[in-house]
Structure formats: C-alpha cells, structure tokens
Amino acid sequence: MSISLQAEHGGDLSAARAAFPQAPEPWLDLSTGVNPYSYPCIDLSAECLTKLPDSGALRALEEAASKAFDVPRHAQVVAAPGSQAIINWLPHLIPARRVGILGFSYSEFARSFAASGAKVTIAAEPAALQHHDVAIIVNPNNPDGRIAAKRDLHAVAAALANHHGLLIVDEAFADFVPAASIVPKMPASGVIVLRSFGKTYGLPGLRLGFAIAPAETAARLREALGPWPVSGAAIAIGTRALLDTEWLALTWERLQTDAAAVDKILAAAGFEFVGGTPLFRLVRHGEAQRLYESLAQAGILTRRFDARPDWLRFGIVSLPGGRKRLRTALGLGLQRSENECRVD
Amino acid sequence: MSISLQAEHGGDLSAARAAFPQAPEPWLDLSTGVNPYSYPCIDLSAECLTKLPDSGALRALEEAASKAFDVPRHAQVVAAPGSQAIINWLPHLIPARRVGILGFSYSEFARSFAASGAKVTIAAEPAALQHHDVAIIVNPNNPDGRIAAKRDLHAVAAALANHHGLLIVDEAFADFVPAASIVPKMPASGVIVLRSFGKTYGLPGLRLGFAIAPAETAARLREALGPWPVSGAAIAIGTRALLDTEWLALTWERLQTDAAAVDKILAAAGFEFVGGTPLFRLVRHGEAQRLYESLAQAGILTRRFDARPDWLRFGIVSLPGGRKRLRTALGLGLQRSENECRVD
C-alpha cells in the first residue's frame, strides 16, 4: 500500500474556502471527529495565560487524566500540546527500523515514522504486526471505528515485548468507547497509549493530549517536551473537564441521539454504514466523490480519502438546522448526480 | 564549567510555595522576565478553541511575525508552541557533536543538546565559538542583558558557514531591544533566530514562539512540529498582537519608567547593577542568597543562579503597591541579615 507523506486532514476550512469560493458562509464543518458540544470554558482566569504554566498545576492535570483514563499504578501520564505532538516525537525517542500500522488508519503515524527513516508497512491483521520494532493500532480506529479485540492487543504487545518491540495504541476516540481501552489493564512495559483531549471535549484548538507509558519512556518524553509543554489554558480547562464525569455522561447521551439522526439522513441518501464512533460516521456510496463536491458547494465540508474513493466520513451534527441543511444538500447533490448520469 | 541537566527556571510558584509555606499570598512573582503588562485578549472568539487551528490562520500569524520582526525575503518564519519547543527539537534536526554556547546564559540549550549526546562547551567570547558544529548566542543575553556586537554575530556565522556549521541566535528578549536583532540583515544560510512571544506580550501561558530560518531548515522544523503546532488562541491573539505596533511602543515606555523605579529600589538596598533589558534587571549583592530567602519569606519570588551566588534577577514591578512591597521586604531582609552578622 502506498503511503502519501503529504497528509490531508479534516478541519482545514481555509483550503475548503479556496477550493470552493462560491460556497455559502458559514461553512458547516463535518470533516473532523470533533465533539460539536464543546466543554464550557468561559470563566477562565487570566492567570492561566499571563503566568508561565506552573509545575504543580501540570501535575494536577496529569493526575486528573490518570483518574479519567483509569491508569494503573505502573504507568505514568505525560501531557503534551496535542497527541499529534507525541506522534511527532515518538520516532525520535524510539529508534525503529520496521514499523507496522494496522490499516487503513490515521495517516500521521506513517508520515512521522517514515520521515525518520523507518520502513513503514500497513498491516491488515494484528497478527501481521508482531515482527516489527514498533506496531501501531488506532483503537477505536479512525476513520472506520473498528475496535481491536483485547486479546489481539495483548497478543501483539506480548509478541513485540519478546524482541524488545513496542506497541503504540492510539485511543484518540476511546473516551466515548471506554470498553475498548487497554489502559486499565495495560502491561507494565512495551505499550504506550495516546489519548486526545480536544476531540472529546470539543476543544481541538486548545492543543492537549496525553501519553500513558512506563516510567522510563514517560521520562524520555517529558525530557523531549521540555518545561512548559502545554498552555496554561489547557492545564486549567483540561483539569476541570477530565474530572467532570457528569458532563461526559450527559454529552455521550446527546451524541448518541444526534448520531442516530445523522445515520438516518445518510441512509436516506443511499449511504451504506461502514463504521464509526459517537464522534464520526464512516459511510460508503458509489457517488461519494460527486456528493463530496456537492456538499462542499453547499458549504458543508466532509472528509474524503484518496485511497478509498467510495468513502466519506461525517462528523456529528448537533443542531436540527444543521441536519436540515445536510439533508437538503444531499438531496440536491443526488439529483445533480442523477441528471449528470442521464446526460452522459 | 559544569552544566546541570536538571535545569531550574523562574516562575515556578508551586515549588516556591512548597519551599516557603509561611509566605503570604498572593506571591509577587519577579522570577521571570515576563512583561507585567499583558496584551489584552478578552474578546477571544470561541472558535479559536472549538475548531482545529486552520492552516490559513497559521500562515497569517507567521506573516504577522515576519512583518513584526522585519524578516528578509530569503528567510521563513515557523510558529511553535513556545520557543522552548524549538529548543527541544533543534538537536534532533541539526546533528551536532560539538556545541558552543556563549555563557553565562539560558540553561535550556545546554540541557537539550547535551541530552542528544552532543559535547557542550560554554564559551566566554564569540570568537571561541567558531570551531563548533553549532554555536548559540542568546542576544540580548539572559540573565545579564549583554548585547553581542553585530560584527561578532556575522563573524561567527561566517566562520561556522565555512565548515557547514550553524549559528543559533536566541532573541527571546529582543522585542524591546530591536537594534540588537540580527534578523533584518541575517545571512541567507547558516543562521537560525528564535523569538519568543509570551515574554514581550505578557502571555507566557499561551505557548507561542517562532524560528526564523532558511527555507530548508524551516521545512524540517515544520515537518517535526507536524500539523496544528500552536493553539487557536495563540494564533488569534498572536496575529493581532504582533501587528499592534502602537501597543508595543506604549508598553515599552511604561516598562522603561517602571524599570527605572525598580533600579532605584535595588540600588537603595545596596545592589550593584550588572545588566538587564526592559523586562528584567540583573543585580549583584554580597548577601544575595540571604536576601533571596528573605524576599521569598515575604512572598516575593526572584531568580537566583547556583553558579552565581551573588546574583539575583528581578522582573519588572508595574504596580506602585508591588514596588512598595519589594522595598519593605528588602529593608527587612537587610536588617535581618545585619542582625545575623552581629550574632555571628
């Protein structure tokens, strides 16, 4: 499988505006898996920006994360300015020649490890990951929501540990699928788990993510990130949000209702459900590329994949007005698509 | 000169509170070189946190920085979550065996390069830097405000370029000493300049800094930092602040007045002026260590240096109340110091 090093990502409205200059504003951005219900952060103290982030406050954030993710005693939590920052650092901290990634998945691992000179292979099955120096499983997977079996995760970790290999589990989308998480029973060595904050709490602009790792790896990551790894705002909001289990439960319920409503709209437009999490839906359609364009012309940005031209990924639409806009745009797109077929 | 890898930094109030639990709250933190007049950032749009940072907005931030720093066409600006993040990355992007740092200076360069396995030497003169793979000059220097002569900077850069070496100039404190900056006339290759945002604009908790580098080095740094290197808040506030030359000029005036008032208080307490910038003053006193303790007991945190026991660095005190508190605490400290000497 070919790996594009020039990764494309959701959420880039500048690029969308440039490509579709006639699209009506404001754009409805469904191209990311970001929670449309963002955690409230209005009463932010000015101190969180006007002072250097404090070491004690940073520790409190990491403790809140440890509690929220149910981190076992033998592992440590390290905060970073986004889990992406950790993905950038890992190849420099963990020398790896052969890197295996359970595909089809988030492109940044391949980019980051390939840039460091590693040979990156995309594997179709967890078992095929066992002979690599580093194996990567995104779980739940992005973009299809696939959940790896616990026994597969532990089997890969054990096989890699036999030759001092390392399993990286990216749990960016695990907060709303907590049963999928390996964290509470993660082995004492040979596994690093990444968690994202911005997606779940609807604040990706904050830049906050975590690594959960054995003490020695955690220390190396801390050293790499240096003092003041995350912003004062990320520390203040993150600490409060991660301890707010009530908000998480309530939001989860709302997202499930909204996701069901989105599924209904997509099914009515002829999309076949491929997978998803409460934060995004992956669907298949023979006219996916045409529909992507039609939606974009109507100011609705979705995520398409060069390597999977019949797939589209949709974020969750929380407002009824947004869902109506999506339904209408899909209807128009299908009509246009049909007319074009007739002319052909 | 020995290099401590466990760097100490200003601004760590958690550590100060633990060491001086009886000190009155709130602490007056003079341990950093952070502008006490922070750039106003009240009308921040929620979008800057609830959306992934946009590539177009990031480019606009870098363009604003380019204008503010007077960056020549042959160089590029790269935004990072603090110039510290760039310091962490540099040893991984620029393989260097022999690293020379113009001392006595900011400790993080030595820590970062030594951690990557480089042999770090502290040089007393710019000329002594010429035979290294990488030379580092903090200009104006932290903590003493020393300004390197332009001809020295260019001579070191030229000498290093002869054997494919690289000069790193850290201009974290150059915004209020713009004549010191090498940026407008930086050579087309062999020089990287770092700039800090948080110190000048009083927002170190925001985490924003820049590298100014030739295109090839800039591209490698961008690749290392990956997508979404800085927060949406940093992009929004940074872009606005960097274009606000009026605020910078006005604040500069206020800081100079305040710095003069602080100098007067320090001189009255018997401190000898060593150097500084409009954001900090470095002073010498035979009783510096005792005064550090006395001030801390009074809830005033200053910066001391293990390797220079007779030095203290003071941030600028903007409020008359704060200056009164400093004056009183210094008076009490000197009294106590005198009494202790008598008892001895």
Image (cartoon, coloured by chain):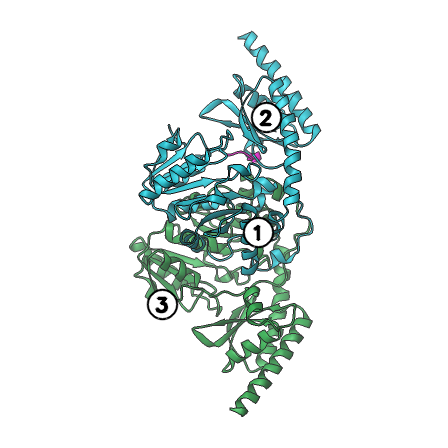
Chain colours: A cyan, B green
State whether discs 1 and 3 lie on one chain: no
Name the residue type under label 2.
Ala
Label 1 resides on the chain identified as A
Overall secondary structure of the magenta section: loop
Q: Gap in Å between the C-alphas at discs 2 and 1?
A: 40 Å
Foreground residue, A163 or A103? A163
Image coords of residue B151 (percent x, y)? 39, 63
User: Disc 3 on helix, strand or loop?
Assistant: strand
Q: Report the disc number at residue B123.
A: 3
Q: Gap in Å between the C-alphas at discs 1 and 3?
A: 44 Å
Please name which of the two marks, 2 or 1, marks the residue nearer to the observer: 1
In terms of image quadrants, where is residue B11? bottom right
User: Disc 1 on helix, strand or loop?
Assistant: helix
Please report whichever mark, 2 or 1, sits nearer to the chain's N-terminal start. Answer: 1
Q: Report the disc number at residue A64.
A: 1
Residue density around tag 1, few if under 14, some if 14–19, many if 20 or more, within 10 Å = many
Query: Residue sitting at 31 percent across and 53 percent down?
Result: B164
Span shown in magenta: A9-14
Label 2 resides on the chain identified as A
Name the residue type under label 1.
Ala
Q: Are marks 1 and 3 in contact (CB under 8 Å)?
A: no
The residue wearing badge 2 is: A296
Query: Residue sitting at 42 percent across and 45 percent down?
Result: A187
In terms of image quadrants, where is residue A151? top left
